[in-house]
Amino acid sequence: MPIEDRFRFWCTQGAIKPGGPSDWAICDVDQRRVITVRMDEEQDSEDVALGYFKRHVESLGPDITLIHLAPNGDVVSVSTDLMDDTTLTMCYPSLNLVQAPEGVQTILRSDLRELDRFITNVDLVSYQSTDTTPPTTKKAVFKYYWQEQFMEQRWDELNLWVRLPSHPNIVPIDRIVLDEVRGGVVGFTTPYIPGGNLEDNTSRPFKLKWAKQLMQVVDDLNLRYGISHQDVVPRNLLIDEDADNIMLYDFNVAAQIGRDRGLGFLHYWDVRDDVRAVIFTIYELITRDFHFRQQDWRELDLSTVQDVEWVLHPDVTLDHPVSEYRALLNAWVKGREQGVQVTMYTEAPHYIDWPLLEKLEPERTLQGDYHLLASGKLLDPVE
């Protein structure tokens, strides 16, 4: 599926000379590269250049690094000069820094076949799995990064997720993905679970047992491992139809309870606590009323859903009366309020921790020992 324009294109930087020209480095997430757009005028913003760039982006060859546009948006010239390439070399951390638990498998990025795009930096892929004899084609979800600003977040997500013990209600890490040049960690895969998430797929019943499982997995994350998921919403819930289990995934904003790991890394935000999120999620799954998602988390008041009648949406099927879901939820919330509290992740009996990633200095390119393209190709050393 194509990535929406509002997520696909954005400007990473601009260089504007008095009277012109104006150079804008436009990131194309779909093609995973940055192209400089030059216009002769002095411009206050990238809006004009970006609008014209969208006309031509599909026709630009993979080696184009700069496109010069006329005031009306027509192409004046293009450049393939590497000196015009503003795509930063990505410094992928080595596998040994992850200190992954024993048994975690790896795979080269080149062994993955892209099938589709879900969102930015998340693809549907397939690969030949040797876990069976003979090997079989396996589908997976590939989460990765190719820009520096996402490095810390993806590092924390991988390290947190890969350390979670096997759980019937958590989608597991499948493979750690390595680049082909140095073997650095590009990202990771998780098993592909068909059927869509609970926000998009309204055709199947929402079972009471799945509500119980959701509460249990949140208890385990918070109270056993000291982890707050911080994004328990219907779109992050899948159903394993073979096991008849609800599955929680996507830990890209999860954090250690009570800890801020630093700028760019995952940090704990108490207003996004998982108990509140479960209440709103079950309410939404029953009523299909999602308008609360448009509000700031800090302004959400639980009484707006706890003190009102929950009207079953006509397109939603339950296997028990609404009253049983509410009774189960109320009992669970009361138990969490009166039970053991974890206010710092180290208070959890099996808390999860992982090494901080030291900021890597960007590699030198044309004036250094080598130039590494975003494609992963290593060019000959430049004198």
Image: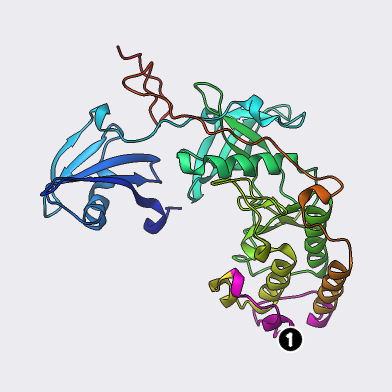
Is residue 155 shown to the viewer in this render? Answer: yes
| Residue pictured at 86% horizontal, 73% vertical | 334
Looking at the image, is 152 positioned above or below residue 283?
above
Q: Position of residue 318 (x, y in %)?
A: 76, 75
Quadrant for residue 362, please give it: top left
Label 1 Cα neighbours within 10 Å, binned few <14 / some 14-19 / many ≥20: few
Q: Give the vertical position of 320 relative to 86 (above or below).
A: below
Amino acid on which the number 1 mark rests in the picture: Asp
Q: Residue at x 46, y 39 (%)?
A: 148
| Residue lying at the far top of the rendered structure | 383
Specify whether residue 14 is painted magenta.
no
Q: Position of residue 291 (x, y in %)?
A: 56, 77
> Within the image, what quadrant is residue 4 found in?
bottom left
Residue 301 in the magenta stretch? The answer is: yes
The quarter of the rendered structure image containing the C terminus is top left
The front one of 279 and 199 is 279
Residue name at image x 38 percent, y 28 percent: 373
Most foreground residue, 183 or 91: 91
**Percent position (x, y) of residue 332?**
85, 70
Q: How is the image coloured?
A: rainbow
**Residue, disc 1:** 307
Left or right for 253, reference 318: left
Does the magenta stretch mainly form a helix, a strand or a loop? Answer: loop
Element at badge 1? loop
Is 19 rendered above or below residue 126? below
- The percent position of residue 63, horizontal first and vertical second, equals 28, 31
Magenta residues (range): 297-324
Exactly how many numbered labels are in the figure?
Answer: 1
Please determine whether, in this image, residue 52 is positioned above or below residue 383: below
Question: Does residue 139 show up?
Answer: no
> Left or right of 80: which side holds 10?
right
